[in-house]
Image (cartoon, rainbow, N blue to C red):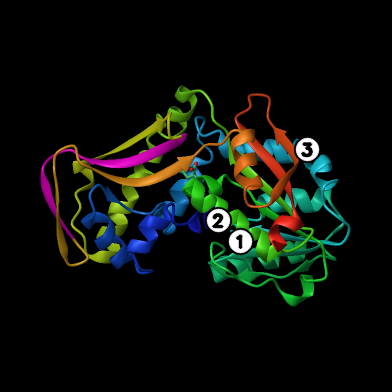
Amino acid sequence: MPALARSALRYSARHEAAASDSFADHVIAGLGDSPKWLSAKYFYDAAGSDLFEQITRLPEYYPTRTELKILRENARAMAAAIPLAAALVEFGAGSSRKSRILIEAAPQIAAYVPVDISAEFLAQEAAAVRRDVPGIAVLPVVADFTRDFELPPQVRARPRVGFFPGSTIGNFEPEDAAEFLRQAGRILGAGATMIVGVDRIKDEAVLNAAYDDAAGVTARFNLNILARMNRELGGDFDLAAFRHHAFYNVAGHRIEMHLESLKHQTVTVAGRTFEFRAGETIHTENSYKYSVESLGALARGVGWLPAGVWTDADKYFSIQAFTLNDLIVRA
Ligand code: AVJ
Protein backbone atom coordinates (compact mmCIF):
# COMPACT_ATOMS: atom_id res chain seq x y z
CA MET A 1 0.00 0.00 0.00
CA PRO A 2 2.56 2.55 -0.98
CA ALA A 3 0.25 5.47 -1.66
CA LEU A 4 -1.58 5.09 1.60
CA ALA A 5 1.73 5.14 3.33
CA ARG A 6 3.03 7.86 1.07
CA SER A 7 0.34 10.17 2.31
CA ALA A 8 1.01 9.19 5.89
CA LEU A 9 1.44 12.65 7.01
CA ARG A 10 2.82 15.02 9.43
CA TYR A 11 3.24 13.15 12.64
CA SER A 12 3.33 16.33 14.60
CA ALA A 13 1.52 19.60 14.01
CA ARG A 14 4.25 21.35 15.98
CA HIS A 15 6.84 20.07 13.54
CA GLU A 16 4.74 20.85 10.52
CA ALA A 17 4.09 24.38 11.73
CA ALA A 18 7.83 24.93 11.79
CA ALA A 19 8.32 23.67 8.25
CA SER A 20 6.79 24.71 4.97
CA ASP A 21 5.61 22.29 2.29
CA SER A 22 8.94 21.91 0.48
CA PHE A 23 11.23 19.02 1.38
CA ALA A 24 14.23 21.38 1.51
CA ASP A 25 12.55 23.76 3.98
CA HIS A 26 11.39 20.79 6.01
CA VAL A 27 14.91 19.37 6.23
CA ILE A 28 16.38 22.77 7.17
CA ALA A 29 13.79 23.18 9.94
CA GLY A 30 14.06 19.60 11.25
CA LEU A 31 17.84 19.21 11.21
CA GLY A 32 18.29 22.73 12.54
CA ASP A 33 16.16 21.92 15.60
CA SER A 34 17.28 20.30 18.82
CA PRO A 35 16.56 17.41 19.07
CA LYS A 36 16.67 16.84 15.30
CA TRP A 37 13.57 15.47 13.55
CA LEU A 38 12.06 14.73 10.13
CA SER A 39 8.45 13.88 9.30
CA ALA A 40 7.63 10.26 8.48
CA LYS A 41 5.77 11.39 5.38
CA TYR A 42 9.11 11.86 3.60
CA PHE A 43 9.92 8.14 3.82
CA TYR A 44 7.75 7.42 0.81
CA ASP A 45 9.64 8.27 -2.36
CA ALA A 46 9.72 5.44 -4.95
CA ALA A 47 12.49 3.56 -3.09
CA GLY A 48 10.83 4.09 0.30
CA SER A 49 7.43 2.96 -0.96
CA ASP A 50 9.04 -0.18 -2.32
CA LEU A 51 10.80 -0.83 0.99
CA PHE A 52 7.54 -0.31 2.88
CA GLU A 53 5.88 -2.87 0.60
CA GLN A 54 8.68 -5.29 1.60
CA ILE A 55 8.11 -4.46 5.28
CA THR A 56 4.45 -5.51 4.98
CA ARG A 57 5.62 -9.00 3.99
CA LEU A 58 8.21 -9.45 6.78
CA PRO A 59 7.53 -12.24 9.29
CA GLU A 60 7.95 -9.77 12.20
CA TYR A 61 5.69 -7.09 10.72
CA TYR A 62 2.25 -8.38 11.71
CA PRO A 63 0.04 -5.25 11.16
CA THR A 64 -0.74 -5.55 7.44
CA ARG A 65 -1.49 -9.25 7.34
CA THR A 66 -3.41 -9.08 10.63
CA GLU A 67 -5.62 -6.23 9.44
CA LEU A 68 -6.31 -8.06 6.16
CA LYS A 69 -7.26 -11.19 8.11
CA ILE A 70 -9.61 -9.24 10.39
CA LEU A 71 -11.20 -7.64 7.33
CA ARG A 72 -11.69 -10.96 5.53
CA GLU A 73 -13.03 -12.77 8.57
CA ASN A 74 -15.44 -10.02 9.60
CA ALA A 75 -16.40 -8.39 6.33
CA ARG A 76 -20.01 -9.57 6.65
CA ALA A 77 -20.40 -8.11 10.13
CA MET A 78 -18.78 -4.85 9.00
CA ALA A 79 -21.09 -4.78 5.98
CA ALA A 80 -24.01 -4.82 8.40
CA ALA A 81 -22.81 -1.45 9.75
CA ILE A 82 -22.90 0.06 6.24
CA PRO A 83 -26.21 1.66 5.19
CA LEU A 84 -28.04 1.07 1.91
CA ALA A 85 -26.69 2.93 -1.15
CA ALA A 86 -23.75 4.25 0.89
CA ALA A 87 -20.64 6.02 -0.36
CA LEU A 88 -17.36 4.58 0.98
CA VAL A 89 -14.82 7.39 1.45
CA GLU A 90 -11.27 6.08 1.86
CA PHE A 91 -8.82 8.49 3.49
CA GLY A 92 -5.41 7.96 1.81
CA ALA A 93 -6.58 5.44 -0.72
CA GLY A 94 -3.49 3.28 -1.08
CA SER A 95 -3.91 0.19 -3.18
CA SER A 96 -7.68 -0.05 -2.53
CA ARG A 97 -6.96 -3.67 -1.55
CA LYS A 98 -8.65 -3.26 1.81
CA SER A 99 -11.62 -1.26 0.49
CA ARG A 100 -12.25 -3.97 -2.06
CA ILE A 101 -12.82 -6.49 0.72
CA LEU A 102 -15.53 -4.23 2.18
CA ILE A 103 -16.99 -3.46 -1.25
CA GLU A 104 -17.24 -7.17 -2.08
CA ALA A 105 -18.94 -7.96 1.22
CA ALA A 106 -21.28 -4.96 1.06
CA PRO A 107 -22.97 -4.78 -2.33
CA GLN A 108 -25.10 -1.94 -0.94
CA ILE A 109 -22.05 0.34 -1.36
CA ALA A 110 -23.04 2.41 -4.40
CA ALA A 111 -20.06 4.74 -4.61
CA TYR A 112 -16.35 4.52 -3.79
CA VAL A 113 -14.52 7.79 -3.10
CA PRO A 114 -10.77 7.24 -2.74
CA VAL A 115 -9.01 10.38 -1.47
CA ASP A 116 -5.28 10.66 -2.04
CA ILE A 117 -2.60 13.24 -2.72
CA SER A 118 -1.11 11.22 -5.58
CA ALA A 119 -3.25 11.90 -8.68
CA GLU A 120 -1.46 9.37 -10.83
CA PHE A 121 -1.78 6.49 -8.38
CA LEU A 122 -5.40 7.44 -7.67
CA ALA A 123 -6.38 7.37 -11.36
CA GLN A 124 -4.75 3.97 -11.75
CA GLU A 125 -6.59 2.49 -8.75
CA ALA A 126 -9.89 4.09 -9.75
CA ALA A 127 -9.66 2.55 -13.21
CA ALA A 128 -8.95 -0.88 -11.71
CA VAL A 129 -11.95 -0.71 -9.33
CA ARG A 130 -14.23 0.47 -12.17
CA ARG A 131 -13.07 -2.47 -14.26
CA ASP A 132 -13.46 -5.06 -11.51
CA VAL A 133 -16.63 -3.84 -9.78
CA PRO A 134 -19.33 -3.10 -12.34
CA GLY A 135 -22.15 -0.89 -11.14
CA ILE A 136 -20.17 1.06 -8.54
CA ALA A 137 -19.57 4.80 -9.05
CA VAL A 138 -15.85 5.47 -8.53
CA LEU A 139 -15.28 9.14 -7.70
CA PRO A 140 -11.62 9.81 -6.84
CA VAL A 141 -10.69 13.03 -5.05
CA VAL A 142 -7.15 14.37 -5.33
CA ALA A 143 -6.52 15.99 -1.96
CA ASP A 144 -4.37 15.98 1.13
CA PHE A 145 -6.86 14.21 3.38
CA THR A 146 -5.41 15.78 6.53
CA ARG A 147 -6.67 19.13 5.28
CA ASP A 148 -10.18 20.18 4.45
CA PHE A 149 -11.60 18.85 1.17
CA GLU A 150 -15.04 18.59 -0.42
CA LEU A 151 -16.86 15.38 -1.22
CA PRO A 152 -18.02 15.04 -4.83
CA PRO A 153 -21.57 16.47 -5.18
CA GLN A 154 -22.85 13.03 -6.33
CA VAL A 155 -22.32 11.55 -2.87
CA ARG A 156 -23.82 14.32 -0.77
CA ALA A 157 -27.25 12.70 -0.82
CA ARG A 158 -25.84 9.26 0.09
CA PRO A 159 -25.11 7.87 3.55
CA ARG A 160 -21.37 8.26 3.99
CA VAL A 161 -18.92 5.76 5.48
CA GLY A 162 -15.32 6.84 6.07
CA PHE A 163 -12.56 4.22 5.96
CA PHE A 164 -9.08 4.82 7.40
CA PRO A 165 -7.17 1.51 7.51
CA GLY A 166 -3.49 0.65 7.97
CA SER A 167 -2.96 2.27 11.39
CA THR A 168 -1.95 5.40 9.50
CA ILE A 169 -3.72 7.23 12.35
CA GLY A 170 -0.79 6.06 14.52
CA ASN A 171 1.58 8.42 12.69
CA PHE A 172 -0.29 11.42 14.15
CA GLU A 173 0.33 12.84 17.56
CA PRO A 174 -2.81 11.91 19.58
CA GLU A 175 -4.12 15.50 19.51
CA ASP A 176 -3.65 15.56 15.73
CA ALA A 177 -5.42 12.20 15.46
CA ALA A 178 -8.37 13.72 17.35
CA GLU A 179 -8.30 16.76 15.07
CA PHE A 180 -8.24 14.48 12.02
CA LEU A 181 -11.28 12.53 13.28
CA ARG A 182 -13.13 15.77 14.06
CA GLN A 183 -12.49 17.01 10.55
CA ALA A 184 -13.47 13.67 9.01
CA GLY A 185 -16.79 14.06 10.83
CA ARG A 186 -17.21 17.54 9.39
CA ILE A 187 -16.43 16.32 5.86
CA LEU A 188 -18.60 13.19 6.05
CA GLY A 189 -21.47 15.00 7.78
CA ALA A 190 -24.59 14.05 9.72
CA GLY A 191 -25.33 10.33 10.05
CA ALA A 192 -21.83 9.29 9.00
CA THR A 193 -20.00 6.10 9.95
CA MET A 194 -16.22 5.85 10.30
CA ILE A 195 -14.18 2.61 10.17
CA VAL A 196 -10.61 2.88 11.48
CA GLY A 197 -7.86 0.24 11.54
CA VAL A 198 -5.34 0.69 14.35
CA ASP A 199 -2.43 -1.21 15.85
CA ARG A 200 -2.98 -2.22 19.47
CA ILE A 201 -0.80 -1.85 22.57
CA LYS A 202 0.91 -5.19 23.13
CA ASP A 203 3.99 -7.02 24.39
CA GLU A 204 7.05 -4.83 23.93
CA ALA A 205 9.11 -7.62 22.37
CA VAL A 206 6.55 -8.14 19.58
CA LEU A 207 6.51 -4.40 18.84
CA ASN A 208 10.28 -4.01 18.93
CA ALA A 209 10.76 -6.94 16.51
CA ALA A 210 8.16 -5.52 14.09
CA TYR A 211 10.17 -2.30 13.75
CA ASP A 212 13.65 -3.84 13.87
CA ASP A 213 13.42 -6.93 11.69
CA ALA A 214 16.17 -9.51 11.39
CA ALA A 215 16.57 -8.97 7.64
CA GLY A 216 17.22 -5.26 8.17
CA VAL A 217 14.49 -4.04 5.82
CA THR A 218 13.11 -1.50 8.31
CA ALA A 219 16.66 -0.24 8.85
CA ARG A 220 17.00 0.29 5.09
CA PHE A 221 13.59 1.99 5.04
CA ASN A 222 14.67 4.39 7.80
CA LEU A 223 18.12 5.05 6.26
CA ASN A 224 16.49 5.70 2.87
CA ILE A 225 15.50 9.16 4.12
CA LEU A 226 19.23 9.99 4.20
CA ALA A 227 19.66 8.61 0.67
CA ARG A 228 16.65 10.66 -0.42
CA MET A 229 18.22 13.84 0.96
CA ASN A 230 21.41 12.96 -0.92
CA ARG A 231 19.47 12.38 -4.16
CA GLU A 232 17.07 15.31 -4.00
CA LEU A 233 18.83 17.94 -1.92
CA GLY A 234 22.48 17.47 -2.83
CA GLY A 235 23.27 15.93 0.54
CA ASP A 236 26.47 14.11 1.46
CA PHE A 237 25.17 11.78 4.17
CA ASP A 238 27.33 8.68 4.65
CA LEU A 239 24.69 6.01 5.29
CA ALA A 240 27.30 3.81 6.98
CA ALA A 241 27.84 6.53 9.60
CA PHE A 242 24.25 6.25 10.91
CA ARG A 243 22.30 3.38 12.41
CA HIS A 244 18.61 2.54 12.59
CA HIS A 245 17.27 2.66 16.13
CA ALA A 246 13.64 1.73 16.84
CA PHE A 247 12.12 1.07 20.25
CA TYR A 248 8.77 0.95 21.98
CA ASN A 249 8.32 3.90 24.32
CA VAL A 250 6.09 2.23 26.92
CA ALA A 251 4.92 5.40 28.68
CA GLY A 252 4.24 7.14 25.36
CA HIS A 253 2.46 4.11 23.81
CA ARG A 254 4.48 4.53 20.67
CA ILE A 255 7.24 3.09 18.56
CA GLU A 256 9.92 5.69 17.97
CA MET A 257 12.29 5.45 15.04
CA HIS A 258 15.55 7.34 15.06
CA LEU A 259 18.73 7.53 12.98
CA GLU A 260 21.72 7.63 15.27
CA SER A 261 24.99 9.23 14.25
CA LEU A 262 27.81 6.77 14.93
CA LYS A 263 30.42 9.51 15.23
CA HIS A 264 30.92 13.23 15.44
CA GLN A 265 30.34 14.46 11.88
CA THR A 266 29.32 17.40 9.75
CA VAL A 267 26.85 16.90 6.91
CA THR A 268 25.89 19.24 4.10
CA VAL A 269 22.35 19.12 2.73
CA ALA A 270 19.98 21.65 1.14
CA GLY A 271 22.86 24.11 1.02
CA ARG A 272 23.39 24.06 4.81
CA THR A 273 25.75 22.27 7.12
CA PHE A 274 24.60 20.38 10.19
CA GLU A 275 26.73 19.01 12.95
CA PHE A 276 26.04 15.66 14.60
CA ARG A 277 27.50 14.61 17.94
CA ALA A 278 28.40 10.92 18.29
CA GLY A 279 25.18 9.26 19.46
CA GLU A 280 22.96 12.16 18.44
CA THR A 281 19.76 11.10 16.65
CA ILE A 282 17.27 12.34 14.08
CA HIS A 283 13.77 11.39 15.24
CA THR A 284 12.14 10.11 12.03
CA GLU A 285 8.86 8.51 13.10
CA ASN A 286 6.33 7.95 15.85
CA SER A 287 3.91 5.07 15.43
CA TYR A 288 1.30 5.30 18.21
CA LYS A 289 -0.45 2.21 19.51
CA TYR A 290 -3.98 2.30 20.94
CA SER A 291 -6.12 0.10 23.13
CA VAL A 292 -9.74 -0.29 22.06
CA GLU A 293 -10.59 1.99 24.98
CA SER A 294 -7.99 4.68 24.26
CA LEU A 295 -8.99 5.06 20.60
CA GLY A 296 -12.65 4.97 21.68
CA ALA A 297 -12.07 7.77 24.17
CA LEU A 298 -10.17 9.85 21.63
CA ALA A 299 -12.96 9.40 19.05
CA ARG A 300 -15.71 10.08 21.58
CA GLY A 301 -14.05 13.36 22.48
CA VAL A 302 -14.63 14.62 18.93
CA GLY A 303 -18.15 13.26 18.47
CA TRP A 304 -17.75 9.65 17.31
CA LEU A 305 -19.59 6.93 19.24
CA PRO A 306 -18.44 3.27 19.22
CA ALA A 307 -20.44 1.08 16.81
CA GLY A 308 -18.33 -2.07 16.49
CA VAL A 309 -14.91 -3.57 17.23
CA TRP A 310 -13.24 -6.41 15.37
CA THR A 311 -9.90 -7.90 16.30
CA ASP A 312 -7.66 -10.96 15.88
CA ALA A 313 -7.08 -13.86 18.29
CA ASP A 314 -3.74 -12.39 19.45
CA LYS A 315 -5.35 -8.94 20.00
CA TYR A 316 -2.58 -7.38 17.91
CA PHE A 317 -4.73 -5.09 15.74
CA SER A 318 -8.26 -3.73 15.77
CA ILE A 319 -10.77 -2.36 13.32
CA GLN A 320 -13.27 -0.07 14.99
CA ALA A 321 -16.47 1.46 13.67
CA PHE A 322 -17.94 4.71 14.96
CA THR A 323 -21.06 6.70 14.20
CA LEU A 324 -21.28 10.44 14.38
CA ASN A 325 -23.05 11.92 17.37
CA ASP A 326 -24.74 14.71 15.40
CA LEU A 327 -25.72 16.61 18.55
CA ILE A 328 -22.05 17.23 19.32
CA VAL A 329 -21.12 18.09 15.76
CA ARG A 330 -23.86 20.69 15.42
CA ALA A 331 -23.14 22.26 18.82
C1 AVJ B 1 2.44 3.03 7.57
C2 AVJ B 1 2.54 4.27 9.59
C3 AVJ B 1 1.33 2.23 9.53
O1 AVJ B 1 3.82 2.70 11.70
O2 AVJ B 1 3.73 0.60 11.23
C4 AVJ B 1 6.45 0.53 9.29
C5 AVJ B 1 5.05 2.69 8.99
N1 AVJ B 1 7.39 2.37 9.88
N2 AVJ B 1 7.69 0.25 9.76
C6 AVJ B 1 3.78 1.77 10.89
C7 AVJ B 1 6.26 1.87 9.38
C8 AVJ B 1 8.24 1.37 10.09
C9 AVJ B 1 3.75 2.09 9.40
N3 AVJ B 1 2.55 2.91 9.03
Q: What is the three-letter code of the residue carrying label 2?
A: Glu
Label number found at residue 179: 2
Considering every residue shown, the one lying at the far front of the view is: 331
Label number found at residue 56: none
Q: Which residues are magenta?
A: 253-268
Q: Is residue 257 magenta?
A: yes
> Relative to residue 93, is residue 280 drawn left or right?
left
Ligand 1 contact, mark 2 (Cβ < 8 Å)? no
Contact, CB < 8 Å: mark 2 with mark 1?
A: yes
Front residue of this view, candidates 232 and 304: 304
Q: Secondary structure at mark 2?
A: helix
Label number found at residue 74: 3
Considering every residue shown, the one lying at the far bottom of the view is: 153
Other residues around mark 1 within 10 Å, as few (<14) / some (14–19) / many (≥20):
some
Q: Position of residue 270 (x, y in %)?
A: 22, 65
Q: What is the three-letter code of the residue carrying label 3?
A: Asn
> Taking 193 as reference, is 135 above or below it?
below
Q: Which residue bears the numbered disc 1?
A: 183
Front residue of this view, candidates 164 and 56: 164
